[in-house]
Amino acid sequence: METKQSTEEIKTTGETTPTREDGGNDAPVKDLGSNDQRAQASVEAAQKEMLYLRAEMENYKRRMLKEQEQAIRFANEKLIKDLLGIADYFDLAFAHAKPIKARTGDPELTNFVSGIEMTQRELVQLLGRFGVEFIGTVGEKFDPVRHEAISQKESATEDAGTVLEVLQKGSLLHGRLLKPARVVVAKKHEA
């Protein structure tokens, strides 16, 4: 049933009220169904948007916490790299002092070398408490990510690609490579 609006009604009230086609206007016709549906759709869209924004905010928080944790874990990286240079010097000092200690048997020299050994151990333990791990051992398989091959030597006993010598230890900080181990790698023995 169509509704008509009387022109007198529009002039006097200023409002448009739908009336029945038969001329009676005792019961205005309401068209709320489409408004309710639009409102419901609008509410659902707003809820979805809110859930999306909430999820984005949670992801942002997690990402920021992870970045903050990483920044804290690696804040001492520069200092640790500098200390690793000192650890390398201790390794060299110990490597050169060990044969001298064995040859001379002098008690003062023995005490001096023992002091170097203790200081080196303390430094390694200190670095370990801050998440430093030393890498590079003789006999392990060469890994180009963790090792830097300085040279190759023929070997009849070891497989090609095996670490024969460690010239300088490498290090990791919480699993991140700080410095590769400098090594000598075995190559195939040519007869």
Image (tube, grey):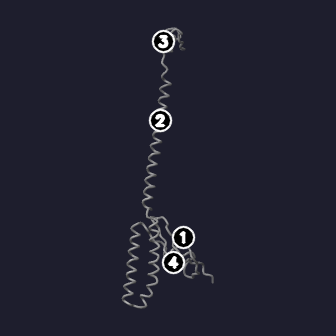
Which residue in the protein does label 4 denote?
167
Quick check: marks 1 and 2 in contact, CB under 8 Å? no
Q: Which residues are magenta?
A: 143-147
Numbered disc in front, either 3 or 2: 3
Which residue in the protein does label 2 denote?
46
- Residue at 63% across / 82% down in the picture? 190
Which residue in the protein does label 1 denote?
143
| Mark 2: secondary structure | helix
Disc 1 to disc 4, C-alpha distance: 15 Å
Q: Neighbour class for label 3 at 10 Å: few (<14), some, many (≥20)?
A: few
| Mark 1: secondary structure | loop
Q: Residue 134 is drawn in which quadrant? A: bottom left
Sequence order check: which comes first, mark 3 or mark 1? 3
Identified by mark 4, the residue type is Leu
Sequence order check: which comes first, mark 2 or mark 4? 2
Above or below for 182 versus 56: below
The image position of residue 40, as x and y in percent, is 47, 30
Confirm whether the magenta stretch covers residue 145: yes
Which residue in the protein does label 3 denote?
13
